[in-house]
Image (tube, rainbow, N blue to C red):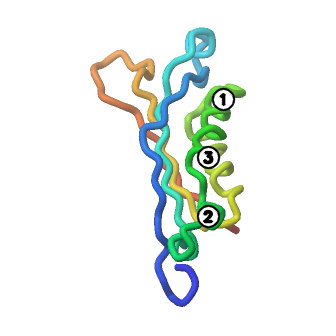
């Protein structure tokens, strides 16, 4: 919920692609692979809409750049850890009340046919 009993609006960035070296296996660290990120931000967009003012919402282009830096940055073993780091980037924007982050690992080293591996987390302000 946000001011005056309104439910939070959402801004969604879906299908952001970046190459990272995350995983537990040495080959994942050496070769890297593509990760796909979806984020949903929960915030009040009414002030931005009322004033047609980008400074009163989240610049999703700037956010995308920051998220890609995390995916391309320091490797982690688990995509759960990566998702948590990405959520922290989203919550660094003061207007964001909650963030839902999904990390897709479509080339995960699974020896069976599959479409995707996805970890989704939701984090809010303390």
Residue of label 2: 96
Decide which of tag 1 and tag 3 comes sooner along the chain: 3
Q: Tell me the quarter of the picture where residue 80 sits.
A: top right
- Nearer to us: label 1 or label 3: 3
Q: Position of residue 7 (x, y in %)?
A: 47, 78
Identify the residue shown where x is 57% and y is 44%.
61
Identify the residue shown where x is 44% and y is 35%.
104
Crowding around mark 1 (Cα neighbors within 10 Å: few <14, some 14 to 19, many 20+) is: some
**SS type, badge 2:** loop
Whether tag 1 and tag 2 are in contact, CB under 8 A, the answer is no
How far apart in space, not on screen, are marks 1 and 3 (Cα)?
Answer: 21 Å
Q: Tell me the quarter of the picture where residue 94 sits.
A: bottom right
Q: Position of residue 119 (x, y in %)?
A: 47, 42
Crowding around mark 2 (Cα neighbors within 10 Å: few <14, some 14 to 19, many 20+) is: many
Identify the residue shown where x is 61% and y is 46%.
63
Q: Residue 63: which numbered mark, if any?
A: 3
Q: Position of residue 76 (x, y in %)?
A: 66, 29
Whether tag 2 and tag 3 are in contact, CB under 8 A, the answer is no
Residue of label 1: 76
Farthest residue toward the front?
A: 52
Q: Position of residue 121 (x, y in %)?
A: 52, 51
Q: Relative to 63, is 14 on the left or the right? A: left
């Amino acid at each position: 919920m946000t001011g005056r009993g309104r439910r939070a609006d959402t801004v969604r960035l879906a299908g952001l692609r970046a190459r990272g070296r995350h995983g537990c296996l040495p080959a994942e660290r050496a070769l890297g692979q593509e990760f796909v990120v979806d984020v949903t931000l929960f915030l009040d967009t009414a002030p931005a809409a009322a004033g047609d003012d980008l400074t009163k919402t989240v610049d999703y282009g700037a956010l995308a750049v920051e998220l890609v830096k995390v995916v391309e940055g320091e490797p982690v073993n688990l995509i759960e850890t990566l998702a948590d780091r990405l959520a922290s980037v989203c919550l660094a924007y003061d207007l964001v009340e909650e963030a839902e982050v999904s990390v897709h690992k479509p080339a995960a080293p699974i020896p069976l046919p599959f479409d995707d591996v996805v970890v989704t987390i939701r984090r809010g302000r303390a």
